[in-house]
Image (cartoon, rainbow, N blue to C red):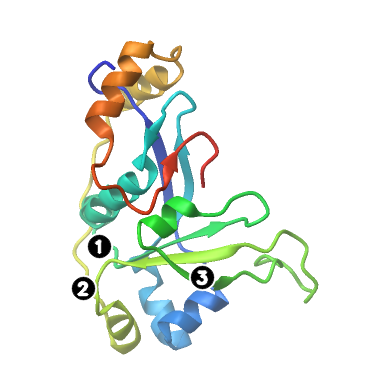
Amino acid sequence: MGPGRPVACLAWSSAPRHLGSRDVYIGWTAEARRRNIRFIAYNTRFLILPWVRVEHLASHILGRMAARISDDWQRMYGHPIYFLETFVDPERFRGTCYRAANWVLLGKTTGRGKQSNSYVPNRSIKEVLGYPLTKRFSRTACGGRMKSAKRRRVDVNLDELGQVLDAARQAPPSEAELRQTQGSLACPGGDAGATAQHGED
């Protein structure tokens, strides 16, 4: 596989403001949630490209992401991240890679969505998984103001971003490239057997 060739893509966004199972897990008040919700990042998408076949890669990527996302967020938005969360649709996926990466099941959504005026579910009910980036997150989130910093400007190189997207659209690599990928990215010892395959949640 050529150097710098993408194997996966993750998308993150700000967290939903109201999420019952998460709010119960953290135990914060409405005021603490309003003040500290920005310190949570929501994993909206996680895709491993269809031609990649590397055991344990998905949970390995989640672990690497957890180790760096707070610093990346600090550079981009001027404050760190203390907690990660995502949704998994149990009718389609099992969330194996998240569980193998030590994410915790917090509960389930109501299936109503934030714009609903009814108590009747109008969409699929999803599992809510979370991952604290600090052992004292819950105490900090409930007790006071979290550490922040002055926002700094970050310049994004659109040409480089375009090159990454173009590379992702290229034809699948050769068998030799795949063997090289498996030798360089597989995690010895593994993590509960999560497998990086197309469609894994």
Q: In this view, does 89 lie above or below 200?
A: below
Left or right: 192 in relation to 115 = left
Image location (x, y in percent) of residue 114: 65, 67
Image location (x, y in percent) of residue 21: 54, 77
Looking at marks 1 and 3 on the same chain, the residue that comes earlier in the sequence is marked by: 3
**Residue 17 disc label:** 3
Nearer to us in this view, 188 or 82 = 188
Left or right: 169 in relation to 113 = left
Q: What element carries label 2?
A: loop
Packing grade of label 3 (10 A; few <14, some 14-19, many >=20) is few
Q: In which quarter of the image is residue 3?
A: top left
Q: Which residue is drawn at 40% across and 23% down?
A: 165
Q: What element carries label 3?
A: loop
Q: In which quarter of the image is residue 7?
A: top left
Q: Given the image, on which type of amino acid does mark 1 rest? A: His
Q: Given the image, on which type of amino acid does mark 2 rest? A: Lys
- Spatial CA distance of label 2 from label 3 is 20 Å
Q: Residue at x 25, y 27 (%)?
A: 183
**Residue 57 disc label:** none
Residue designated by label 1: 79
Packing grade of label 2 (10 A; few <14, some 14-19, many >=20) is few
Looking at marks 1 and 2 on the same chain, the residue that comes earlier in the sequence is marked by: 1
Residue 42 visible somewhere in the drawing: no
Whether pointer 2 and pointer 3 mark residues with C-beta atoms closer than 8 Å, the reply is no
Residue designated by label 2: 147
Packing grade of label 1 (10 A; few <14, some 14-19, many >=20) is many
Whether pointer 1 and pointer 3 mark residues with C-beta atoms closer than 8 Å, the reply is no
Residue 143 visible somewhere in the drawing: yes
Whether pointer 1 and pointer 2 mark residues with C-beta atoms closer than 8 Å, the reply is yes
